[in-house]
Amino acid sequence: MLAETICSAASAAGLGIAAVTAWRRRFLTATRIAAYSLVPIALVLTGFVEWVAPIAFKPTVWLGFGLLAVAWLLFAITRAIERRSGGTRKERRAAARAAQGEAVAPAASVPSLGSGLPDSSSRPQAKPRQQSAAPAEDFSDIEAILKKHGI
């Protein structure tokens, strides 16, 4: 009951702000504000608030969200360390075997989630840029303008 009242008050306040904005002849902004302010009352009318309110006020639910955040953080940290250290364990083993002289298929031929971007050998090579044979341009007119303005 409290959540529905808060959503209704937020919608009413938003519609009031939209009316004041429209009175100032900023109709596009007023329309956006009105659209945003209709969302809370729409959530109440669809029953979403009744479904979420009991869940949102349980400490066990917040503990679960906290654990999900910790898990996501651990995944992100291990991914960053993996990228920094030079790839996955499989790629490091393949590099060690190649260094020892064993014939091993390249690690890039085996797709994995941690493989990142393909190696540079599979990319098309860019053509080298041709150096222009034109003589260096004369910048004396630019220098004169800069000196005129004291720069």
Image: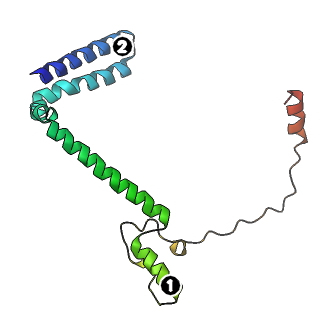
Residue drawn at (43%, 79%) of the image: 93
Q: Which of 130 and 82 is in front in this view?
A: 82
Q: Which of 71 and 137 is in front in this view?
A: 71
Pinpoint residue 108: horizontal percent, then vertical percent.
44, 75
Locate the N terminus by quadrant: top left
Disc 1 packing (10 Å; few <14; some 14–19; many ≥20): some
Q: In which quarter of the image is residue 3?
A: top left
Disc 2 packing (10 Å; few <14; some 14–19; many ≥20): some
Disc nearest the viewer among 1 and 2: 1
Evaluate whether residue 108 shows in this view: no
In the rendered image, the vertical position of residue 12 relative to residue 114, given as above or below: above
| Residue type pointed to by label 1 | Ala
Which circle's residue, 1 or 2, is located before the other in the chain? 2
Q: Quadrant of residue 64?
A: top left
Q: Which of 128 and 10 is in front in this view?
A: 10
Residue drawn at (20%, 42%) of the image: 63
The reply, left or right, for residue 31 in relation to residue 58 is right
In the rendered image, the vertical position of residue 84 relative to residue 34, given as above or below: below
Residue drawn at (88%, 37%) of the image: 143
Q: Is mark 2 on a helix, strand or loop?
A: helix
- Residue bearing the label numbered 1: 98
In the rendered image, the vertical position of residue 143 relative to residue 27, given as above or below: below
Locate the C terminus by quadrant: top right
> In the rendered picture of this protein, how many numbered marks are placed on residues?
2
Residue drawn at (45%, 80%) of the image: 94
- Residue bearing the label numbered 2: 21
Gap in Å between the C-alphas at discs 1 and 2? Answer: 69 Å
Pinpoint residue 109: horizontal percent, then vertical percent.
42, 78
